[in-house]
Structures are given as C-alpha cells and as structure tokens.
Image: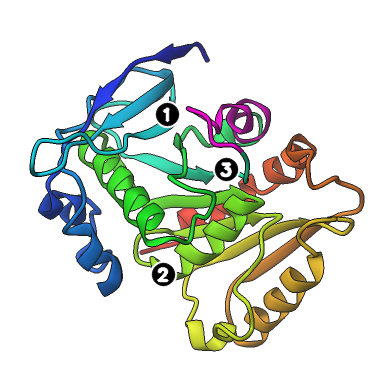
Amino acid sequence: MKRIVLPLVLLLTCSALFSAYGHANALPSPQVSSSAQKLPLAQPLIRRSPGVYDEQLLRQHADGSSAEPLRFVLSVPENDLANAATPLVVALHYSGNITPFFAEDMFYDLIDPALADLNALIVLPDALSNDWTTPANEAALLQLIASIQAAYQIDTNKILLTGYSLGGTGAWFLGQRHQALFSAILPISGMPPAPEQATPAQQKWQIPIYAIHSLTDQVSSVTATRDYIMQLQASGSDATLVTLEQADHYDFAAFTDALYQAIPWIESIWKQPE
C-alpha cells in the first residue's frame, strides 16, 4: 500500500471515549476510568480512504494548552466500505528509542505481510513511554481505539490485540484488563503476567489467547510463556502456544510466517457466535 503522511487533530470527549467501544460492558477498569477523565480533549477522527497513513492525534488540555500528541500508523484496507463492519487489529511495538511513527518497520516487515489477508483496519500506536502497562499508555490506547471506532464501522466482535516483545507483554497486560473490548490476544515474544501478580485462574481469562515464542529467545524466556499457557489450559482457558525452533529476539521479521499461520485461528475466533 502507498504510505500517506497526514497530520491529524483529534479532540474526543471523555463520554464519547467510552461510548464508542460498541459494548456496554467494554468500559475500562475503574482505575482507567478515573484517569481517563483527565485525558486531553479531541475532535472526531477523519475517515481515510484505503491506504497507509502516518497520523497524529494533536490533543489539547482543558485550559487550551497543547498535550502530548498520539502518533500512530494506520492501515485502511482496500475493502473498507462505509456500510460494512471492518475487523480491527491493534499491534503494539517493541522497546527502543521511540521516534515518531516508531512502529513503521514492524508494520511493513511483520504485521502487514502476515495479516494483510484479514482485510482488517490495522493501527500501530507509538507508546508514550517504553512500558505499555503504564496508566498513561493504557488510557491513551483506549482513547485511540475509541476514536477509530467513532470514525469507522468496526466489527466489535472482531478486534484483535497483538504485539511484539515489549508490545507482546503489553498485549498480555491490556488484553487481560479489557476482555470485553478485545475478541482475542496474540502476544509474540512477550512476557505473561508474573505468578506473584495473579494466577491465570485468578485473572479469569475469558478470551482466546494465541502466543508465539522462540525456543531460543535470549531476552524473554519461552519458559514463562510455556508455563503460563499450561496453567491457562489447566484452568479451562482457550490458550495456544506456537514455538519457533530458531528465531532471534531482535529479528521480528523472522516471526512473519508464524504470524501468517495464525490467520485460520483468528478467523475461527471471529466466526464464533456472540
């Protein structure tokens, strides 16, 4: 797809932020709801024609001062129609020096080659800091998803959360906290919640999980992911682990085929009755 760079001003009220989810039970946890009341205001997102865009949500505080913008890569599929519901894929990037549109490489080298056949709208936000589990990043991501749902006709039963490395850890964390929003999570090379935080049974997972991890990962050990998936399966959760024999943690493109092979699983989840 041709990339189009366009600045974007988004001012979304807090009430619209949560009503845009599409489910009455998709509200964030109380902690996020409280912090979301302090989010900068924004204006509705402009609907784009098919293509790939570098976007900015230029936000403004109530006193008129500028707030930190939310940058993101947005891919609108060729089949996007105003009268048809479109799936949504939210992909969280890895750690690093977060320059503007930091997730571009991940989109072009991993997410788009692997998941283009889903014909989904894809968004890859820049984190506000190198930790997707912070309240600020959590609230910003929810605000972005709500703005997209307000601008596009998103199928609320077909929202996938994925991520690589740091983003995989974020997918575990945010997916568990917002199970009414996401239909499934697909963490890649991320770390699941630590045992001391809560067991899988205590976390009450209700959405399907498909994890991909390298057996030779030198940063995020596969052991933690394997153990957690086994506990999920033992507690009755729908959890799958796919391992790669040889894949370097710093070569995210090496996971493209494994992610592509997950498409039948994703589509089977999306076809399940509500």
Magenta highlight on residue 174: no
The amino acid sitting under disc 3 is: His
Q: Is residue 149 above or below residue 265?
A: above
- Tell me residue 124's x, y (percent): 48, 37
Q: Residue at x 63, y 27 (%)?
A: 105
Is 12 on the left-hand or right-hand side of 223?
Answer: left
Q: Which residues are magenta?
A: 97-112
Magenta highlight on residue 102: yes
Circle 3 sits in a helix, a strand or a loop, which is it? loop
Is 8 on the left-hand or right-hand side of 255?
Answer: left
Q: Which mark is residue 74?
A: 1
Q: Which residue is mark 3?
A: 93
The reply to whether residue 95 is visible in this rendering is yes
The amino acid sitting under disc 1 is: Leu
The reply to whether residue 156 is visible in this rendering is no
Q: Residue at x 35, y 60 (%)?
A: 181
Marks 1 and 2, how far apart at CA: 24 Å
Marks 3 and 1, how far apart at CA: 14 Å
* Crowd tier of the residue under label 3, counting other residues whose Cα lies within 10 Å: few below 14, some 14–19, many 20 or above: many
Q: Which mark is residue 177?
A: 2
Circle 1 sits in a helix, a strand or a loop, which is it? strand
Circle 2 sits in a helix, a strand or a loop, which is it? helix
The amino acid sitting under disc 2 is: Arg
Quick one: label 3 or label 1, which is nearer the N terminus?
1
Which one is in front in this view, the residue at disc 3 or the one at disc 1? 3
Quick one: label 1 or label 2, which is nearer the N terminus?
1
* Crowd tier of the residue under label 2, counting other residues whose Cα lies within 10 Å: few below 14, some 14–19, many 20 or above: some
Which one is in front in this view, the residue at disc 2 or the one at disc 3? 3
- Give 258 or 16, whichever is nearer the viewer: 16
